[in-house]
Amino acid sequence: MQDFIKIHENDKVIVALKTISPGETLTVEVQGKTGQVTAREEIPAGHKMAICDISAGEEIIKYGCRIGNAKEDIQAGQWIHTHNIKTALGDLLEYTYEPVETGREAEAPPSGKDTGATFLGYNRPDGKVGVRNEIWVIPTVGCVNNVAEAIAREANLWRLAQGKKYSEVGEVIAFPHPYGCSQMGDDQEHTRQILADLINHPNAGGVLVLGLGCENSNIDVLKGYIGSYDQERVRFVVSQECEDEIAESMEMIKELMSYAAGFKREPISVGRLVIGMKCGGSDGLSGITANPLVGRFSDRLISLGGTTILTEVPEMFGAETILMNRCASKELFDQTVNLINDFKNYFKSHNQTIYENPSPGNKKGGISTLEDKSLGCTQKSGSAPVRGVLQYGDKVEAAGLNLLSAPGNDLVAATALAAAGAHIVLFTTGRGTPFASPVPTVKISTNSRLAGRKSNWIDFNAGVLVEGKTMEEETEALFNYVVEVASGRQVRSEAAGFHDMAIFKQGVTL
């Protein structure tokens, strides 16, 4: 394993891959010349060490970009972290469209071997495809959450008691949430749109929509957001209109299972896959291993006609121009500017600083500023041009790379990706987390220590990229793993029975 990595030739820092002791001398290229730098203090693994003298106020460069300015004079060999670096971000900025030539999207698959690549999925009557064939119970309002969960428990016991009869039907899953009533404005609209998006999601072979009856987002209102639907696939129960809502729901669940059992896995082009991309609990290796790996995966899938979605707008701050200049048109550039500025205004409207984002876990792992985190975060976008910009609750339409408006919160952002149409979410992490989302959520560790210590959480280890494995090897391995998941292989959170969802709340609760 390497002792350190210099990410870009213009960087003024290296990232320690193991703890560097005071007095340890490293051979590193500095300003085009190979020389030696001696550590003046301990540099924890994942953290940054200066490889040249940096004056107070001078830009600190990592990823070839500014990650902040020095608070004080910094000598070569010093540890660089929150004590001596400050963000250079301000509030609203003016942006100019300066399109750049993008990279790998146009490349042919290696040796043509991926031409016609397929996964085993479910073709739906409306032309969509799914990677799961589950039964979802969607409550319209938090008041019936416990009922929804009780229905799912009873339905799963009944399904298992039927033996192989429903072997093609997956788990019955309830998605409780606290909303659907006592909401106003955008919050109420967001709840209705996200619920409708999930009801229409092709990973669900059948859906039971469970209402209370007196809520703002009641079933009759929600139907306007759902649009046209297959009455065999979607059923509705209004609890206040039933003598026994669980018994009535169970009868409908049985009918939904019979309907879903008619679907069988069959070969489908990987170009039909939609993959969401999200990170959380970052460390100093996030932008070196897992995030660039997901970026290479994204380029690979897009080259085969597939679609990826990048979200977490606050974690684009400081790296947004990289995405803006990859927009395929001026119209998309303008939409991306609005995407960024709308979120900045959201922060300002709540009297919050725009740039205070890295969590305590991020900082402990070596992330010093929001620019530092964002430049690592946006590595997940690969090098393809931006083909679509989505508002929260929008459904993806354009093949290729899309940007989605959602916050950095893991559960909210992952749910937004699923609602936008993602079949699977790739979630990179340097700290680890057991959470799930409405769709299979692949946890990709940035380091091997985490993968070994939390093997019950982690699905794929990108830490091997600093242990001798090449990016090409691991891109192939991740691509093959995602195809397996799309074809039915369970991820760790699915095997544990974890299924989460969360809706973005911004305003007043009545």
Image (cartoon, grey):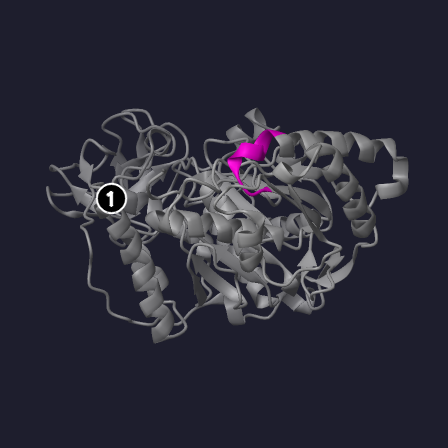
| Along the line of sight, the residue nearer the viewer: 291 or 2 | 291
Which span is picked out in magenta? 139-146
Which of the pair 201/112 is nearer the observer? 201
Left or right, 335 with reference to 445: left
**On-image quarter of the C terminus:** top left
- x, y percent for residue 94: 20, 63
Whether residue 152 is visible, yes or no, is no
**Label 1 Cα crowd, 10 Å radius (few <14 / some 14-19 / many 20+):** many
Task: Give the side of residue 313 with respect to residue 251, left or right.
Answer: left
In percent of width and height, residue 99 lies at 33, 72
1 sits left or right of 171 in the view: left
The percent position of residue 493, horizontal first and vertical second, equals: 62, 34
- Give the quarter of the image for residue 149: top right
Left or right of residue 87, residue 443 in this image: right
Is residue 116 visible to us here? yes
SS category of the residue bearing label 1: loop
The answer to whether 461 is drawn above or below residue 405 in the figure is above
**Residue carrying label 1:** 355
Query: Residue flagged by tag 1: what amino acid is it?
Result: Tyr
Q: Residue at x 36, y 38 (%)?
A: 509
